[in-house]
Image (cartoon, coloured by chain):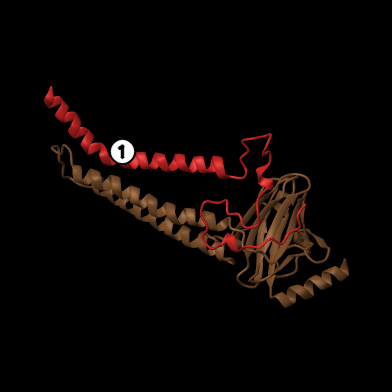
Chain colours: A brown, B red
Amino acid sequence: MAHPSQLGFQDAASPVMEELLHFHDHALMIVFLISTFVLYIIVAMVTTNLTNKFILDSQEIEIIWTLLPAVILILIALPSLRILYLMDEINNPHLTIKAMGHQWYWSYEYTDYEDLGFDSYMIFTQDLTPGQFRLLEVDHRMVVPMESPIRALISAEDVLHSWAVPSLGVKMDAVPGRLNQTAFIASRPGIFYGQCSEICGANHSFMPIVVEAVPLVHFENWSSLMLEDA
Amino acid sequence: MSLIRCLIFLCLLQLIPLFIFIGGGAAMSLLYLARLGLRNPDVCWDRKNNPEPWNKLGPNDQYKFFTVNMDYSKLKKDRPDF
């Protein structure tokens, strides 16, 4: 989850998010290098007493400062396109989960084998126990088996919502009447938080998403328990 | 007259790299647009004979331009027909 005065991304919990982090580091390094270089040139130009009034043209530097930006842009574009196509791949999911957005909660349906469905409401601030996170905790988390490709089908029952979990690198709009598909792999066990990312009314900030990744054995126990309770 | 011709020719000679890069870029963009128009299953040209091509995707079709990790030809069909 995010922590106070955080500047960068949350730690990656899925391979796609790791790739996104590495690409962001790469592009940001290029941006820092260019900005530092330009800032140095500006300072050097402003703080010198030397002048030169007789330069007319110069083929060599023109060639360099045309080719070099083109090369830098290609170096940014190729990894970017690679990640773009990587994020869209469908990778033989082991499990399909439907996440339906309502005003103002999410409901999850696991209908591959049995009919398991439940609602996920935010826990109010006055009901939190010590150690829980304000505006982020829910009563029923979406439990998934770790290290398995999961397909998430996102839709909405009333207005637009968006299902987002930043540490998994996932965001998909929930559109009423439309089924959007996204996939992710939770590479490590843990609890991953996200919040609704499309304005949906008064309690748009109060319908969080919590994904809990556990080993398969625990997932099977949890789903049996949930089926009994239902 | 021939001096002017020489100057124009020299000018064009120095502009050849520009033509290569701009022409190449324009050609690649147009080719990709053509690929999208003709091969993308979301595009419908013939409303009478092929009204909804997105319903005709096979289990191992690759309709994206580029795959990084996934070999779509190895996928099997695990859904019922409808």
Give the residue drawn at x 42%, y 59%: A26
Near mark 1 (Cα within 10 A), the count class, few <14, some 14-19 or many ≥20, is few
Of all chains, the one bearing label 1 is: B
> Is residue B6 rendered to the left or right of residue A127?
left
Residue B71 vertical position relative to residue A220 in the rendered view, above or below? above
Residue A2 appears in view: no
Residue at the extreme bottom of the image, as rendered: A217
The amino acid beneath tag 1 is Phe
Percent x, y of residue A164: 65, 56
Residue A86 vertical position relative to residue B30 in the rendered view, above or below? below
Residue matched to label 1 = B19
Percent x, y of residue A87: 56, 57
> Is residue A215 rendered to the left or right of residue A76?
right
Residue B27 versus residue A19: which sits nearer the camera?
A: B27
> Is residue A135 rendered to the left or right of residue B22?
right
Percent x, y of residue B58: 65, 54
Q: Quadrant of residue A12?
A: bottom right
Residue A211 versus residue A95: which sits nearer the camera?
A: A95
Residue A113 versus residue A128: which sits nearer the camera?
A: A113
Q: Quadrant of residue A146?
A: bottom right
Residue at the extreme top of the image, as rendered: B1
Secondary structure under tag 1 reads: helix
Give the residue drawn at x 12%, y 25%: B2
Residue A118 appears in view: yes
